[in-house]
């Protein structure tokens, strides 16, 4: 089994969309713990709503490419618009950040909210 920390971001109906995403995710993998959510200013395109960011720790038998595909399918199912700019508004954004204890997302090093969310999940005993 793989222990994975997935970064979460949303700035369109964030509370509702994050809750909905977690329900969908629970049907696909074992959700071990969800971090606190942190409000952050948008990166890149500043003329948009603040983001709600956090992370979720899961246990899955899926390999990394299959989990990544599942996360993209969940984003699509929730109506993620991929035609807009890279840093534009989104209903949900899911990225694998830590895979079996190894940081696999470079954004981790430049985004303090990601570091805080990951630290919260790593330090827990779950």
Image (cartoon, rainbow, N blue to C red):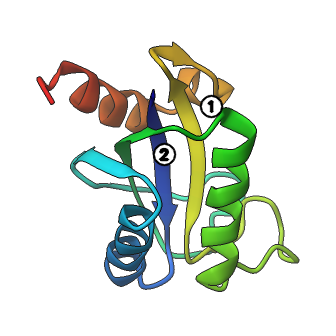
Does dot 2 land on a helix, a strand or a loop?
strand
> Which residue of the protein is positioned furthest toward the left in this rendering?
125
Image position of 108 (left or right of 18):
right
Measuring 59% from the left and 61% from the top, which residue is drawn there? 93
Please name which of the two marks, 2 or 1, marks the residue nearer to the observer: 2
The Cα atoms of the two marked residues, 2 and 1, are separated by 10 Å
Does dot 1 land on a helix, a strand or a loop?
helix
Residue 85 visible within the image: yes
State the residue position of label 1.
Answer: 107
Residue 51 visible within the image: no
In terms of sequence position, does the residue under pointer 2 or pointer 1 come before the other?
Answer: 2
Quarter of the picture containing the N terminus is top left
Residue placed most toward the observer, 47 or 118 = 118
Q: Does the residue at mark 2 contact the one at mark 1 (Cβ under 8 Å)? A: yes
Q: Image quadrant of residue 63?
A: top right
Would you place residue 28 above or below residue 33 in this image? below
Measuring 62% from the left and 52% from the top, which residue is drawn there? 43
Image position of 63 (left or right of 19):
right
Dot 2: within a 10 Å radius of its alpha carbon, few (fewer than 14), some, or many (20 or more) residues? many
Measuring 69% from the left and 69% from the top, which residue is drawn there? 73
Dot 1: within a 10 Å radius of its alpha carbon, few (fewer than 14), some, or many (20 or more) residues? some
Would you place residue 111 above or below residue 10 in this image? above
* Residue 38 disc label: none
């Amino acid at each position: 089994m793989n222990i994975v920390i997935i970064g979460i971001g949303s700035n369109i109906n964030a509370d509702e969309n994050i809750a909905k995403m977690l329900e969908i995710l629970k049907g696909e993998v074992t959700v071990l713990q969800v971090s606190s959510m942190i409000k952050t200013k948008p990166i890149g395109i500043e003329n948009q709503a603040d983001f709600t960011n956090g992370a979720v720790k899961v246990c899955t038998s899926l390999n990394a490419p299959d989990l990544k595909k599942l996360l993209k399918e969940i984003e699509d199912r929730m109506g993620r618009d991929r035609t807009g700019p890279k840093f534009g508004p989104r209903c949900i954004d899911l990225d694998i950040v830590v895979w079996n204890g190894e940081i696999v997302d470079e954004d981790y090093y430049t985004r303090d909210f990601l570091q805080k969310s990951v630290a919260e999940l790593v330090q827990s005993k779950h």
